[in-house]
Structure formats: C-alpha cells, structure tokens
C-alpha cells in the first residue's frame, strides 16, 4: 500500500510539472530541466532539449523555467504557464474520479493554489500584482507573501481542526 501511494504521488507530481513544461513550450519559454524528487541523482536523461532527472527521495518535483524569458511574455501567458500544473492535476482528478489518484491530484492542485511562498498561487499572485502596479514593489510583494502565508496556514489549520 505504501509503495502504491508513493508511486501515485510521484506520478501526480510528475504530471503537474509536465503541465508547466508543455505550457512553457507552447508559449516559447525555455524550460531546460524537469526533476522528480530530492537528494542524490539516480537518473539523468536528455529528451527534446530537456534534462529529465530522477532523484532518490520522491518528495517534490520541479521544472526549471527561464524566468527572465517568462517575464517578457504577456500576463495571460505567464499565468497560463504558472497555473498549467494545477490545470493538469484537475483534469487528471476529474478523469479518475473516486480513486486515490484523483484525491492526490485534487490535493496537489488545491495546495498549489495557496499563496504560499514559491507555490503556484503565490507566483501567480506576484505576476498579477506586478502587472497591476506596472512595476515591482518590495513592500507590496512582502505584504502579499507574509499575508498569504498567514491566511494559508490559518485555512489549513481550520480544516485540520474541522476534520479531526
């Protein structure tokens, strides 16, 4: 059961990052690397100009985007690339309703939408704030980051209390 859970979770993270990768490619944003896991590297293979890396610990995943190039794109493309992982997880969840895989995809999508530092929701919030202000504002960005973290933690804590 544990092995099945770990493999399904790894697959959930992988399709999330593949969503970002495909969206980046569609928008012409370079994405030279996609990794699954942390720790020592087990596998490193290049396919279509992308280095795919598998690490020992199946915790976390990432796609390395050219952020400078992404920031030159229209706001709609930036948001599309940043939310593509969540959209793919929602599609996977809907297409596998009633399974553990569906639940994992819903959970990954929901937690990635939170405005927690470095999550997709936070990144989209930052992009939209910068677009709205037409510039960077350290005060606004730090306020958003701290407030987003507090609100996210409060929401997660209230859910935990409600269901336990």
Image (cartoon, grey):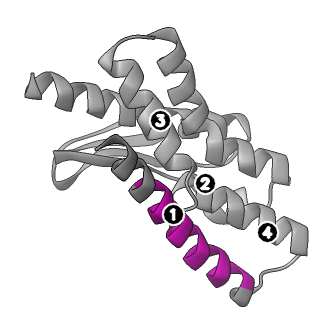
Provide the secondary structure element on which disc 3 rests: helix
Q: Where are the magenta residues, as a range?
A: 140-156
State if disc 2 and disc 1 touch (CB < 8 Å). Answer: yes
Residue receiving disc 1: 116
Q: Residue at x 54, y 37 (%)?
A: 85
Of the numbered discs 3 and 4, the one sitting upstream in the chain is 3
Query: Tag 4's secondary structure?
Result: helix
Q: Is residue 91 above or below residue 20?
A: above
Q: Which tag is nearer the camera, tag 1 or tag 4?
A: 1
Question: Which circle, 3 or 4, is nearer the viewer?
Answer: 4
Q: How far separated are the C-alphas under marks 1 and 2?
A: 7 Å
The one of 109 and 151 positioned closer to us in this rendering: 151
Residue 24 picture location, percent across and down: 64, 42
Neighbor class of circle 4 (other Cα within 10 Å; few <14, some 14-19, many 20+) is: some
How many other residues sit within 10 Å of disc 2, few (<14), some (14-19) or many (≥20)?
A: many
- Picture residue at 70% right of the left edge, 61% below the top: 125
Residue that mark 4 sits on? 129
Dot 1: few (<14), some (14–19), or many (≥20) neighbours within 10 Å? many
Q: Position of residue 58 (x, y in %)?
A: 20, 43
Q: Quadrant of residue 156?
A: bottom left
Residue denoted by label 2:
121
**Is residue 73 shown left or right of residue 36?**
right
Give the answer, above or below, for where 162 lies relative to 93: below
* Viewer-side label of 3, 1: 1
Question: Residue at 56% of width from left, 20% of height from top?
Answer: 91
């Amino acid at each position: 059961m544990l092995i099945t859970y770990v493999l399904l979770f790894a697959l959930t993270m992988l399709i999330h990052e593949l969503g970002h990768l495909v969206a980046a490619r569609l928008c012409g944003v370079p994405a030279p690397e996609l990794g699954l896991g942390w720790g020592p590297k087990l596998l490193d293979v290049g396919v279509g100009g992308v280095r795919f890396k598998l690490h020992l610990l199946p915790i976390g995943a990432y796609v390395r985007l050219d952020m400078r190039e992404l920031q030159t794109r229209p706001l709609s493309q930036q948001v599309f690339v940043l939310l593509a992982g969540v959209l793919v997880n929602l599609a996977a969840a809907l297409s596998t309703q009633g399974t553990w895989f569906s639940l994992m995809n819903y959970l990954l999508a929901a937690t990635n939408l939170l405005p927690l530092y470095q999550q997709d929701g936070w990144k989209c919030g930052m992009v939209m704030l910068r677009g709205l202000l037409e510039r960077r504002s350290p005060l606004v960005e730090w306020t958003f980051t701290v407030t987003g973290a507090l609100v996210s933690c409060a929401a997660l804590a209230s859910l935990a209390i409600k269901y336990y």
